[in-house]
Image: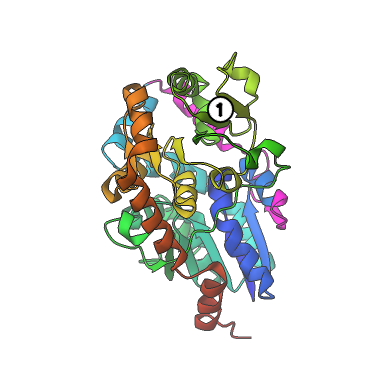
Amino acid sequence: MRVLFVLMPGAGHVFPLVPLAWAFRAAGHDVMVGTCGEGLTPSVNAGLPVVDIAPGFQVQDYLRQLFTKDPGLPAQEHEAARHRQVNFAVILFGPVNRRLADGLLRLARAWQPDLVIYDELGAAGALAATSLNVPGIHHDCGFVRTRNLWRGLQETLADLYDAHGLTRPTEPAVTLDPAPPSMVSEPDGWSVRYVPYSGGAVLPDWLSERSGPRIAVSLGTVTPAVEGPGLMRRIVDVAAGLDAEFVLALGGRPPASLGDLPPNVRAFEWLPMNALLSTCDAIIHHGGAGTALTAAVAGVPQLVLPNGADRYHTADGVQKRGNGLAAEPDELDTSMLERLLSDQWLRVAAREVQAEVRALPSPAETVQRLTSMYKPLA
């Protein structure tokens, strides 16, 4: 079977689907990735064959230009995120899908996949699947319930369906949902086990050695690049007053960008989050779905400081389930960090969610189910 993965540009969209792509390959199937810009390097580094379907297009450049052209957009986006509205994602990523569509259709028609798997923002994947009359598999990335998001993004491509003489699908063939069921209102389609992947690295010797509590800190890859070091610097300032070690994973940013650090804080340009969290007692993060799900797999309490996009949905899932805390970034203080380390109910809930995730179908089991349902005709 040939399986085409259509991935929005960016590590946060590539990483969650890598284990499923590996599982297809391990089962003997052919895999191809269609992405561009910020999605190319993480796909290549995962050992996957990749086609650049929009040469020269960078999503961060597109968003930066969009926000520069209309300075009011960032505030509008943050307000929409605060109210858990997905309409702004449609406004931002509908045009991105349009940029990907022509190159993706060329790739799909040339390579002739039997399945097309696309992430939650990759509406062009459904267009490609429809054009070949093969199943389109929609893969959620986190805690947003994506039915309305999927429909909204499909609507933005309506004219492309018409131009190619295609009938728009009313829903994906299957939706794969990595969110632990107890952390969301209801599963989207098939619940699947989240398997953390965030690249490789040579781990420092000290990682397995510690003399007291350790807290990981991550703001993902987008927040540091777009917003600068302000939020991380605030976390560092609060951390200086706590008797614990803090390890900052800077998402590719240089440690020097933070200036001088207190003795109880280490900063690294890149550390695989699952390797780091296996040595930690808790994590502070921005609400990125991949970070929250990796923390769920590790069974550690979380403190979520959401700052836009889907991150308030993540904060809701963590806070309501009780495996962590959520607060606005400017509410962060020492007492909050002390509770993160000392509250045993947070730890109990985190372990319960960890067990829940482990019981969900693995990527290998998901591949077996998909391939048994959608065997190629020839």
* Image quadrant containing the C terminus: bottom right
Q: Is residue 107 above or below residue 143?
A: below
SS category of the residue bearing label 1: helix
Three-letter amino acid code of the residue under disc 1: Ala
Query: Was residue 77 drawn as part of the magenta stretch in this picture?
Result: no
Q: Is residue 60 above or below residue 157?
A: above
Which class describes the residues within 10 Å of circle 1: few (<14), some (14-19), or many (20+)?
Answer: some
- Which span of residues is magenta-colored? 44-71
Q: Give the residue displayed 49% in from the left and 51% down from the top.
A: 298
Q: Is residue 65 above or below residue 89?
A: above
Q: Seen from this angle, which residue lies furthest bottom?
A: 378
Q: Position of residue 113 (x, y in %)?
A: 62, 70
Residue 273 relative to residue 171: left or right? right
Q: Position of residue 69 (x, y in %)?
A: 45, 22
Q: Give the residue displayed 58% in from the left and 42% down from the top.
A: 276
Q: Nearer the viewer, residue 75 or 16?
A: 16
Q: Quick check: can you spot residue 258?
A: yes
Q: Position of residue 147 (x, y in %)?
A: 33, 58
Q: Is residue 336 above or below residue 190?
A: above
Q: Quadrant of residue 203?
A: top right
Q: Position of residue 214 (x, y in %)?
A: 51, 35
Q: Which residue is mark 1?
A: 225
Q: Quick check: can you spot residue 179?
A: no
Q: Quadrant of residue 41?
A: top right
| Colour treatment of the image | rainbow
Q: Give the residue displayed 45% in from the left and 51% down from the top.
A: 293
Q: Seen from this angle, which residue lies furthest front?
A: 211
Q: Nearer the viewer, residue 19 or 11?
A: 19
Query: Was residue 62 drawn as part of the magenta stretch in this picture?
Result: yes
Q: How many marks?
A: 1
